Image: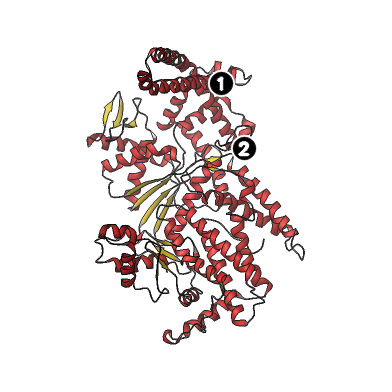
Amino acid sequence: MNILVELRARFRQALAGLVDDPAGLLDLIRPAQDARFGDYQANVAMPLAKQLGKAPRDVAAEIVQRLEVSDLCDPPEVAGPGFINLRLRDDWLASQLSGALLDPRLGVATVDQPATFVLDYSSPNVAKPMHVGHIRSTVIGDSLSRILRFLGHRVISDNHLGDWGTQFGMIIYGYKHFRDDEAFARAPVQELSRLYKLVSQLVDYQQIRRTLPDLRARVVQREQTLAEQQSLYDSADPAEQKRLAKRLRSLQSQVSEARAEVAAAEQKLAAVEQSPLLSPLALAHPEIGTAVLQETAKLHADDPENVRLWHDFLPACRDEIQRLYTRLDIHFDYEYGESFYHQRLGDVVTQFRDRGLARVSEGAVCVFLDGFDAPMIIQKSDGAYLYATTDLATIDFRMQNFQPDAIFYVVDHRQKEHFDKLFAAARLWGYDRVDLRHISFGTVLGEDGKPYKTRAGDTVGLEGLLDEAVRRAYAVVAANDDGKPDGPELDDTQRRHIAEVVGHAAIKYADLCQNRTSDYEFSYDKMVALEGNTATYMQYSYARTQSIFAKGDVDVTALRAEAAKAWGSAPNASRSEAENPIHLDHPTERALGLQVLRLSEAIGEAVVDYRPNLLTGYLFDLAKRFSEFYQQCKVLKAESEPQRLSRLLLCDLAGRAIRLGLELLGIRTVEKM
């Protein structure tokens, strides 16, 4: 049962007749921040009192009089200016916990109205090794897919791979002119990545050479404008200076930006011109940008050589990506890359033009959308298509084949404008009944506050990231095992298996525990710590529950079944607290039991705005409640057999809740640490 949902339903009934639509007030019923004031708190009386023109405490008292919660709660209390405090009955909590003993879902119900979701996430470019920037889309998308499926929805996960377009024009040009055959035979993906970077750098160089004079001229022009404005400011009276100050600051900022742009361009030029390797290549390939576009066009036109090369490159690239997905336990229902939609792009443009939704502007086919300064281009003047065209074809395919209620794109926040335009165009096209949503996320930062890179300035490869996390996890696991009072319990094979699970989990959890829309600072040390909000702490808490059963030689599955059978066979009318196998006599027992039952709330809250960090927050609180219980309550050496049984069952429920919550995040557990 979702306790919060149930309480809100009871309040909805109590508020009927006092307000026409209580929906906005129900969000003010939340778990209490301080256990001294109960388990839940309703702050509905204060805003309602303003509507009714009454004193808040009087309104709160009237709500309490109407409220039917005696089967769940102790008598509600009105506190302060009109807060309604609710404390769940201990016997009701114990009853709910006992009812969950044999439930693999631990009381989490499926939704009443399942929907169909298409989740688009990860989506790397296949000819380049995956890097740290891919981790957020991959693990956020995977966790949302798992959570939505668990709730009973139909989920279609689609990895929209970047396996087409200009990047392959660059790679094909690089392969034809700069390849190292030995390197390609040894490690094809790394060689293709090198070629892509090399060609990209040379293309940028030639582009900068052409545009640098204009950039410099812009600096001169802005400096002249600033000087003129500064002269006017200097000769003006104080009142006029005040009026001119804002304009002056804006011009100063524009000059600084233009100078910085020129400096960055000059730095890129110098990097090529001063390089013994790059300088001769730049001289030998002055029209490389145009040549790359020609190679791309030939691929798109089914040129036999370029298509053959593309087919040669793809298997190794896909294998490289799949190896990382296997390590991370990431799975997709479909992997329809950009190439899958290539033959559909012309029809998209034709439909938009035939229906008057797009028109030609300066040679390009453009969709002009209300609320946007610039149009969305779906075909360039040279006939080439764009990402927007492919994304429209993708929406059309998904709607025709999957009939989804929602299509979610788990992509970083920098793509906001693209998706705003894409969704507007799709609605204009007729797809206005599907929930198109950009699930955006922030950037992974290094300790310097900049996007996370190696000391050499290169973007960190995802495989290297995982390897380092596993190495550090091994050190933590070994140190923890060596420090056990009775000596180490694990052999090296076990340590290495645990390190794999813990290391991979650390990478995932470090990302998922962040608010997805925020940037976050990457830290290996924090990720594998045994304390704090880390996967390692959660996994250690779960392993501790299992160690209790191992030390006591307890068959917890049989114990659970026997207790549930005895409880379930007793008629409801004759059940008493004494018959319930679970007792919540100690404050930490009650706190732990309540937190276990809040799993349903946490999962529900996580999908309100699709934020997995709300589930990680729940798990962190659950692990803390278990730690407090473990420290203050003897389990195997409890004072009586009923108390021992009750505490063993609480350990079981807590461990299962931790394991289930982690599974929904795509994180595995281990029995020992």
Label 1 neighbour load within 10 Å: few <14, some 14-19, many 20+: few
Q: Is residue 325 visible to the viewer in this orientation of the structure?
A: yes
Kind of residue at badge 1: Gln
Tell me the residue at 51%/79% (across/down): 564
Quarter of the rendering occupied by the C terminus: bottom right
Please determine whether, in this image, residue 457 is positioned above or below residue 662. Answer: above
Q: Which residue is mark 1?
A: 267
Please determine whether, in this image, residue 641 is positioned above or below residue 410. Answer: below
Kind of residue at badge 2: Ala
197 and 1: which is toward the camera: 1
Give the colouring mode of the picture. secondary structure
In the picture, residue 558 is in which quadrant? bottom right
Give the number of the mark in front: 1 or 2. 1
Q: Which residue is mark 2?
A: 187
Please determine whether, in this image, residue 530 is positioned above or below residue 17. Answer: above
Q: Secondary structure at mark 2?
A: loop
Earlier residue among tags 1 and 2: 2
Q: Secondary structure at mark 1?
A: helix
| Cα–Cα span, label 1 and label 2 | 31 Å
Q: Are marks 1 and 2 in contact (CB under 8 Å)?
A: no
Tell me the residue at 45%/64% (across/down): 600
* Residue 272, position as x, y percentages in the image: 58, 20
